[in-house]
Amino acid sequence: MTNFWKILWAAALGIALCTFGSPVFATELTVGGKDFTEQYLMAEMTTQLLETKGYKVDKKDGMGTSIVRAALESGEVDLYWEYTGTSLVTFNKITAMMTSEESYAKVKELDGAKGLVWLSPSKVNDTYALAVREGNPHTSGIKTLSDLAAAYKAGKPLGMSAPAEFTRRQDGLIGLQKAYGFEAGIANVRPMDSGLVYAALANGNVDVAVCTTTDGRVEAMHLSLLKDDKHFFPNYVMVPVVRQATLQAHPDLRGILDSLSSKLDDATMQHLDGQVDVKKISVHDVARSFLKEKGLI
C-alpha cells in the first residue's frame, strides 16, 4: 500500500471513530450540585455513573440552592438532585402540610410546567429531626416528639442544642412548639453553630439536638431520632430532576438515574455521609465504592 493510500485509510478510520463514539465527540451533560456533603456525593455518583454509560460530564457542584435551580431553568445545568420540600416551599411558595406522596406529585406537576422533570424518588428524606443519645437517663423513654413535648410540659429541664436559624423559623422551633403544644423555654434552648450541635449532645451538655435525618454523625454517634408522630416537618425527599429538553434528547437518562435512586434511603445516606464527614474518606472514593458495591458500574 502506497503512502498516499495509507494516509487516506488513516483519515477515513479517524472519521469513523469520531462518528461512532469517540470521547472527543461524546454527548456532554452538565451535572449540578449544592454545597454540602450529601450533594457533593450525589453529583459525584451521578457523574461517575453517566461516564460509564458513555457520556462526557461537566460537574458543577458547590452551588447554593437558588443558584443551581436557576442554572437548571436556564439550561446551564442539565440535571441535579433536589428535595421535594425545597421545591415546594422555596421555589413554589407552598407551605401546606402534605404527605411525602402529595409533595412529590405537587412539585412534579408545578415544575413540569416549567420544563423540569422529576424522575423516580429515592427513599431519602433529608428533613429536620431531633436526636437523643443512648444511655441518657433524662431522655429514657422518650421516643417521639409527642413524648418530648410531654416532658417539657411536665417541667423537665431538657437542654436542646439547635442551629441558631432553626430557633427563629416557623418551620423550625416556633412552629414545632405550636404543633406539639409545648414551650421548651429560653433557658433550655441553646442556639449554636450547626457544627457544634452534635458535640454538645455527645459531651452531655444538652439532652436533645436538632439535626437532619441523613447526617452521617447520627450513625457514627449511635443517636436515636425521635419520631415526628404529628408529621410537622416538611418532607424533603431527594429526587433526580432533569430538564425536559435534555430528557427528550437522551431518554436513557431516566433508567440510568432511576437505577441509582432506587438504591438510596436514609440509612444508606447516613452511612455515605459519615464516610466523608466522620471517616474523612474522599467524596470520589466513597461514591465509586458505593456504585461498585451496588453493581451500577
Image (spheres, rainbow, N blue to C red):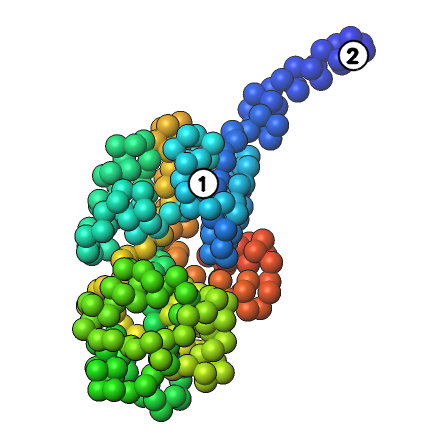
Task: Give the mark count.
Answer: 2
Name the residue located 60 percent from the left edge and 30 percent from the top edge.
Answer: 23
Can you give x and y, in whole percent of width and height, for residue 104 in the image?
25, 48
Instruction: Confirm whether residue 166 shows in the render.
Output: yes
Closer to us: 233 or 13: 233
In the image, which is nearer the foreground, mark 2 or mark 1?
1
Which of the 4 image quarters holds residue 1?
top right
Closer to us: 149 or 8: 149
Secondary element type, mark 2: loop
- Give the residue at mark 2: 1
- Give the residue at mark 1: 67
Name the residue located 49 percent from the left edge and 55 percent from the top edge.
Answer: 36
Can you give x and y, in whole percent of width and height, for residue 235 in the image?
28, 57
Name the residue located 41 percent from the left edge and 30 percent from the top edge.
Answer: 74
Instruction: Confirm whether residue 49 shows in the render.
Output: no
Q: Is the residue 169 above or below the residue 67 in the image? A: below
Who comes first in sequence, dot 2 or dot 1? Answer: 2
Q: Amino acid at mark 2?
A: Met
Closer to us: 185 or 91: 185
Q: How far apart in space, not on screen, are marks 2 and 1 (Cα)?
A: 58 Å
Secondary element type, mark 1: helix
Q: Amino acid at mark 1?
A: Ile
Can you give x and y, in whole percent of width and height, for residue 268 in the image?
42, 63
Q: Is the residue 18 above or below the residue 148 in the image? A: above
User: In the figure, is residue 2 to the left or right of 75?
Assistant: right
Q: Residues within 10 Å of mark 1 (few under 14, many from 20)?
A: some
Q: Is the residue 273 above or below the residue 207 in the image? A: above
Can you give x and y, in whole percent of width and height, for residue 92 in the image?
27, 42
